[in-house]
Image (cartoon, rainbow, N blue to C red):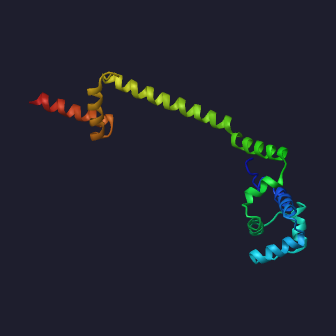
């Protein structure tokens, strides 16, 4: 089964679907209007029905809901009856284009973010190497993590280390 055509993408397809579904049931416009009023309590003028079916008027949301209810469908499901395959393909193509319209911009942003994050990681690795840590030095990394968690910044750790060195020297 084909994906439904969303009425917001092709509003005239709703009227086409209405006409097809009405005709499949063998209803005249008058029959349909009677069924609509009886089943939903909503009474539509015959001119309004004709204009919707002819694509001259877009059904209001409450009208579309009532009409779809008469046919036992959702508004979206009615779209399948309202367009031919070529129109459905064009609608799906329009959706795809909208989804990918800013892909190059998003990709450029992601590459820029990746470059920034890569540089930040390099900076952290350089800082770690300056204080003597290596990738294989798990114990020192764990100790550095505990110190960082305790003191908050590298400067605070260094001040604490200097204070300890000064206190040790004085003893």
In the image, is 44 to the left or to the right of 3? right
Q: Nearer the viewer, residue 110 or 85?
A: 85
Residue 61, position as x, y percentages in the image: 75, 66
Quadrant assignment, res 151 = top left
Q: Is residue 77 visible?
A: yes
Q: Quadrant of the C terminus?
A: top left
In the image, is 50 to the left or to the right of 167? right
Residue 32, position as x, y percentages in the image: 85, 70
Is 79 placed above or below 62 here? above
Label count reads 0
Residue 136, position as x, y percentages in the image: 32, 21
The residue depicted at 73 percent of the width and 64 percent of the height is 72
In the image, is 16 to the left or to the right of 153? right
The residue depicted at 40 percent of the width and 29 percent of the height is 124
Residue 127, position as x, y percentages in the image: 37, 26
Q: Is residue 56 visible?
A: no
Q: Nearer the viewer, residue 124 or 84?
A: 84
Is 64 placed above or below 128 here? below
The residue depicted at 78 percent of the width and 77 percent of the height is 38
Quadrant assignment, res 44 = bottom right
The residue depicted at 13 percent of the width and 30 percent of the height is 168
């Amino acid at each position: 089964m084909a994906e439904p055509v969303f009425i917001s993408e092709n509003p005239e397809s709703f009227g086409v679907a209405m006409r097809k579904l009405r005709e499949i049931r063998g209803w005249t416009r008058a029959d349909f209007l009677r069924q609509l009023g009886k089943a939903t309590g909503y009474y539509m003028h015959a001119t309004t029905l004709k204009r919707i079916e002819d694509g001259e008027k877009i059904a209001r949301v409450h009208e579309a809901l009532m009409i779809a209810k008469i046919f036992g469908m959702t508004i979206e499901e009615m779209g399948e009856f309202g367009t031919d395959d070529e129109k459905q393909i064009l609608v799906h193509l329009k959706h795809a284009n909208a989804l990918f319209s800013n892909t190059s911009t998003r990709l450029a942003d992601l590459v820029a973010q990746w470059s920034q994050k890569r540089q930040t990681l390099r900076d952290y690795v350089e800082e770690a190497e300056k204080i003597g840590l290596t990738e294989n030095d798990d114990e020192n990394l764990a100790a550095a993590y505990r110190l960082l968690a305790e003191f908050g910044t590298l400067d605070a750790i260094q001040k604490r280390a200097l204070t300890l060195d000064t206190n040790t020297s004085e003893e």
